[in-house]
Amino acid sequence: MAERRKRGSKGPLIIIGGGEDKEGDCTILREVVKHLDGGRLVIATVASHEPEGYFESYERAFADLGVTDIVELYVKDRAETLDPKKLGLLDDAAGVFFSGGDQLRISSQIGDTPIEQRVREIHERGGLLAGTSAGASMMSETMLVKGTSGESYKIGDLHMAPGLGLVRNMIIDQHFAERGRFGRLFGAVAHNPRELGIGIDEDTALVFQDDRFEVIGSGCVYVVDGAGVTHSNIAEAEPERALSMFDVRLHVLSAGDTFDVAKRRPTEVPDVTKSHAIETQTMG
């Protein structure tokens, strides 16, 4: 991911599971800085109902890493997305960083507004988009909004909504291992088996570009693939019934691992038929 972007290509997405280190090695924030090339960073605190303090903590952390042009973008409601001063903050921005909070605030307050269009233009011309926690979840087309953590998934206990769709064929969940969100991600994949479920630990991120991503940070990224599922009770069971789903494929990736979303496989590993062959031999 360190190579220069091709001319005319979209910029990278840095999708963070929350709780990124701001005082130690700052691996993830340093990755953000690398892609700015000295340009302006806009911290979008839109996800927060009470944004006080969010910007200041990032301002200090990025200033320590050498970022001198950093501004805050916050809108209280959709009407403010028409404010020329708000839009002007995005002029010539090298990157936009969405902080945490409530992902529904991002999609509902800036979705299909001039601000969203300006953010997309930055990305289209090669600029960086990053998001942590709620700012990570909103990047997918189908956005996980609410669901019980720390227990098996009950079929009626999941709320999803449209995200901004900056990445396709992925449903993203964050604070993953720390909050025990395996059950709800399996539930999301059961509802949408064509989409990969992506669970991202805290202080962990994926750097996504050209249908591939690389993992950075101290934790893991979990990829749940439901394409080969042979049975699911998602459509038949009662709302309080626990989910059953057979033949789910799970990948666990850590720093330095890469994944090809188009092929639904970690890169530079044997074809899936090798896995099936090993499984057959073991059973034999």
Image: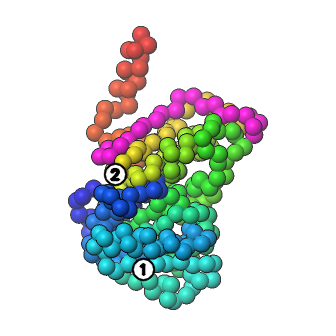
* Dot 2 or dot 1, earlier in sequence: 1
Q: Nearer the viewer, residue 136 or 258?
A: 136
Which residue is identified by label 1?
71
Most common secondary structure along the magenta stretch: loop
- Report which quarter residue 28 is drawn in: bottom left
Residue, far top: 284
Identify the residue at image location x=49%, y=40%: 224
The correct choice, above or below, for 160 with respect to 90 in the image is: above
Q: Within 10 Å of the Cα at label 1, are there few (<14), some (14-19), or many (20+) other Cα atoms?
A: some
Identify the residue at image location x=38%, y=26%: 275
Q: Quadrant of the C terminus?
A: top left
Q: Position of residue 111 (x, y in %)?
A: 58, 71
Q: Quadrant of the N terminus?
A: bottom left
Q: Position of residue 124 (x, y in %)?
A: 39, 70
Which residue is identified by label 2?
216
Q: Nearer the viewer, residue 53 or 257?
A: 53
Identify the residue at image location x=36%, y=56%: 207
Magenta range is: 237-257
- Report which quarter residue 48 is drawn in: bottom right
> Could you tell me if residue 186 is visible in this image?
yes
> Could you tell me if residue 190 is visible in this image?
no
Identify the residue at image location x=61%, y=44%: 149
Rendering colour mode: rainbow
Q: Nearer the viewer, residue 251 or 255?
A: 255
Task: Give the secondary structure at mark 2.
Answer: strand
